[in-house]
Amino acid sequence: MIKVVHYLNQFFGQIGGEEKAHIEPFVKEGFVGPGMALNAAFKGQAQIVATIICGDSYFAENEEKAKETILEMVKQYQPDLFIAGPAFNAGRYGNACGSICKYVKEKLNIPVVTGMYIENPGVDLYKKDLYIISTKDSAAGMREAIPKMADLALKLVNNEEIGSPEEEGYIERGIRKNYFAEERGSKRAVDMLIKKIRGEEFKTEFKMPDFDRVAPNPPVLDITKAKIALVTSGGIVPKGNPDKIESSSASKFGKYSIEGVNDLTSETFETAHGGYDPVYANKDADRVLPVDVLRELEREGKIGELHKYYYATVGNGTAVANAKRFGQQIARELIADGVQAVILTST
Amino acid sequence: MRLELGKIFIKDVQFSDSTRVENGILYINKEELLKEISGDERLKSIDVELAKPGEEVRIIPVKDVIEPRVKVEGKGGIFPGFISKVDTVGSGRTHVLKGAAVVTTGKIVGFQEGIIDMSGEGAKYTPFSKTNNVVIICEPVDNLPQHEHEEAVRMVGFKAAAYLGMAGKNVEPDEIKVYETLPLLEQVKKYPELPKVIYVYMLQSQGLLHDTYVYGVDAKKIIPTFIYPTEVFDGAIVSGNCVSACDKNPTYVHMNNPIIEDLYERHGKDINFLGCVITNENVYLADKERSSNYTAKLVEFLGADAVIISEEGFGNPDADLVMNCNKIEEKGIKTVLVTDEYAGRDGASQSLADSTPKGDAVVTAGNANEIVILPPMKKVIGHPEAADVIAGGFAGSLKEDGSIEAEIQVITGATSEVGFGYLTAKGF
């Protein structure tokens, strides 16, 4: 019998709502909540031996610790398969499902499956690493999601060939694989063209990624009066990295005061970035975040003033969805603080 | 313009005392062929070998593949601007030795030449494992500059194909296909109810051994222009490319442009195929802007409702493809794009260097970065050590036993962006 461990949050684990989101992970033998339907969907080929329940807030705030604890719990049952969720459109739950699935897969080398709604932020973060069954945006989609998760999971355990996203119901992982088509490319192109001309449905063979192009703002009219802020994806943080911004795949950004700071030194600032040689940035972080030069310009009256906070994150394998969210949040705060121009530095 | 293409099916090729076609066999007088193609003092030696489908033979590094053709009726001759004068070709009658091909090899010119395997795994990826190949091995004199080396070998290939093509001049073809495109206004009137289609034919012109020629003119120096599709069948467009082997168009593929053939298949039935706009892929931004502006303008001027745009090469030309798509779609003209992908060996990276949401109809010829293992062959024509340096190969690609581990990028024609092959890719 294939042994399965199932992961749920406090809500689906039937502990409670947001007021229980802080609970630490714990184990229950057998299935809980949606686990019942999942267990049934295995049709006797697999069995949920244990369910791990963890609060969404607890996981988000203690990710490393939570992952370790949960991994130890999973190990005890020596499962052949690990399933998390489905998380539907719950953001923190989606992140937790993705994060713990990835970790279990890496550490125990067993198949993992989760399920999410396409717009769940966990999708962009983990779809490359995991099979994520595409679900509806709420628990109303449970009945549809469960059999797909069970079927795909069984195929993975049995080392069967995994079909296309449409066939299996998972979210496209962005992995391109070659195959020989029945018609040559030119014929496929002509057929597609005729369908497009006639307004019939056609299916592109390659979906062009949607690059988010930003039109530049008009220039600042009088830079000598402008309040200028510094924002960097080069990972410059106060020494010790107080917010623990990740060296890769950052999930957050930091906002730090540079009031009264004229120069960044190796005693006061460093980089958290794991994607470039940090030696020169750690020696003198002004190389990435040019506070010293802007202070000079400020003194000389060439700019109005340097904003008292700067913002930093790590642009190293960071998911576009996260980067976009950081940018929107930072821009809102800068506008509220009356900043007219921003110098963005990258590495 | 009306062209009859008479196909003489060639099922075998053999050396003999005279060059002729008999019962579907191309016999070659090797001495006469060598005499015909020799004389360039930039080449130290030229030799000829045969490679047939199913044989355990590898040809490496492959520079160009050319189809033997001969003009039987009508103006001009094959390869205008190179072998023949610059008369306008594309009308009358042309005979083709279908199933035979000239393949040029010899010391590597640049980094971007290919492999043709006549059997095994690699044979699946190249269309030239199915042709009876007359392989011309050209070795340059010492210290010959690369662009001269390329030119010398290119000319030898054309001469050989023209010479062999002559053998089909007085042979009754097994099949005759007629292709006709009328002058624009007449063509529009002929099928007034059918949607008007133009083929936007992008030619590799990045320079530095990435060149294509039109009636002998370097395509870098052209302004996008109109060409009757049948002109292409007579060799009006030829390759002078040492670009990645998988997705460049060898001269053979230009002469057999499958998009033109397949548009003609639907011509008069589902579409009114008005002709081709050829454009280039130069590296300077101003050139890209000018050529894409001009292409969109021409397509609009000619009254197209829809176009197919094919790319040649990858990376830098992705920008030309996207510009052409955007500017043509902005005029309300529908587009289908044909390209290939460089999604990394694991298929997980971004496939193209540029993108546009307007490119909603794309045909892909596959991921050129996928790894393939080519088994050892009994015979290798050319220089096997080139496997380590050609684009798609890497240090250690050539194993001790003669097998090659490399990206399919190394295989001539593997990811043809005019859709000459069957390979494609999908997302998982």
Image: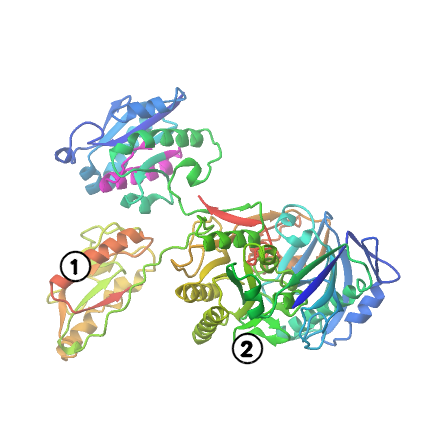
Residue placed most toward the observer, A216 or B224: B224
Label number found at residue A332: 1
- Seen in the picture, residue B336 relative to A183 is either above or below; the reply is below
The tag on residue B370 is none
Q: Residues within 10 Å of mark 1 (few under 14, many from 20)?
A: few
Q: Nearer the viewer, residue B337 or B64?
A: B337
Give the residue pinned by disc 2: B221
Q: Which residues are magenta?
A: A83-112
How far apart are labels 1 and 2 at the CA level?
50 Å
Q: Residue at x 63, y 53 (%)?
A: B126
Of B135 and A316, nearer the camera is B135
Q: Residue at image x 72%, y 47%?
A: B54
What type is the residue that disc 1 sits on? Answer: Arg
Residue in the foreground of this view, choosing between A281 and A123: A123
At mark 1, the secondary structure is helix
Tell whether position A176 is magenta. Answer: no
User: For the residue marked with disc 2, what is the amino acid?
Assistant: Lys
Query: What SS does tag 2 mark?
Result: helix
Specify whether A338 is left or right of A215.
left
Q: Position of residue B188 (x, y in %)?
A: 54, 66
Quadrant containing the N terminus of chain B in the rendered view: bottom right
